[in-house]
Amino acid sequence: QVQLVESGGGLVQAGGSLRLSCAASGRTFSCYRVGWFRQAPGKEREFVARIIWSDGTTAYSDSVKGRFTISRDSAKNTVYLQMNSLKPEDTAVYYCACDRTPGGAYDYWGQGTQVTVSS
């Protein structure tokens, strides 16, 4: 069992920055990868970024590439999402998720944290 708790969301002006945190507890060693997703009102949830827990390999959606950075602190069992140059279209609830096996689906999800970017 893995528990994920997101934090760091809030209200920021366009062009500003926020750093989200995803604190994991439980059997964190079983996370093959940890991803960030977001869901805006009236839209489907979409992939934002992910990191492979063992070697730190990262991947990003085209919409955030160059502006967002995902990282992890293995000692703290925490994954971060540094978000710079925020745009109003980045407004959404952001979720982190854990996938236990390569090629599998994300098994555990956090409750989400709201990010609102004003124009």
Image (cartoon, rainbow, N blue to C red):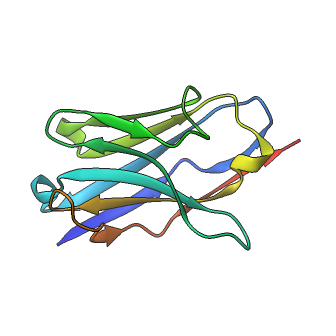
Residue 79 horizontal side relative to residue 94, left or right: left
The correct choice, above or below, for 10 with respect to 18 in the image is below
49 or 6, nearer to the observer: 49
Q: Quadrant of residue 18?
A: top right
Q: Quadrant of residue 42?
A: bottom right
Q: Residue at x 18, y 56 (%)?
A: 31
Query: Could you say where residue 74 lies in the image, as x and y percent from the top left?
Result: 19, 38
How many marks overall? 0
Query: Could you say where residue 93 lies in the image, as x and y percent from the top left?
Result: 61, 62
Residue 29 horizontal side relative to residue 2, left or right: left
Query: Could you say where residue 103 lies in the image, as x and y percent from the top left?
Result: 21, 60
The correct choice, above or below, for 13 with respect to 40 in the image is above
The correct choice, above or below, for 108 with respect to 8 in the image is below
Q: Residue at x 40, y 66 (%)?
A: 110
Q: Residue at x 12, y 62 (%)?
A: 27
Q: Quadrant of residue 3?
A: bottom left
Quadrant for the C terminus, please. Answer: top right
The correct choice, above or below, for 85 with respect to 119 in the image is above
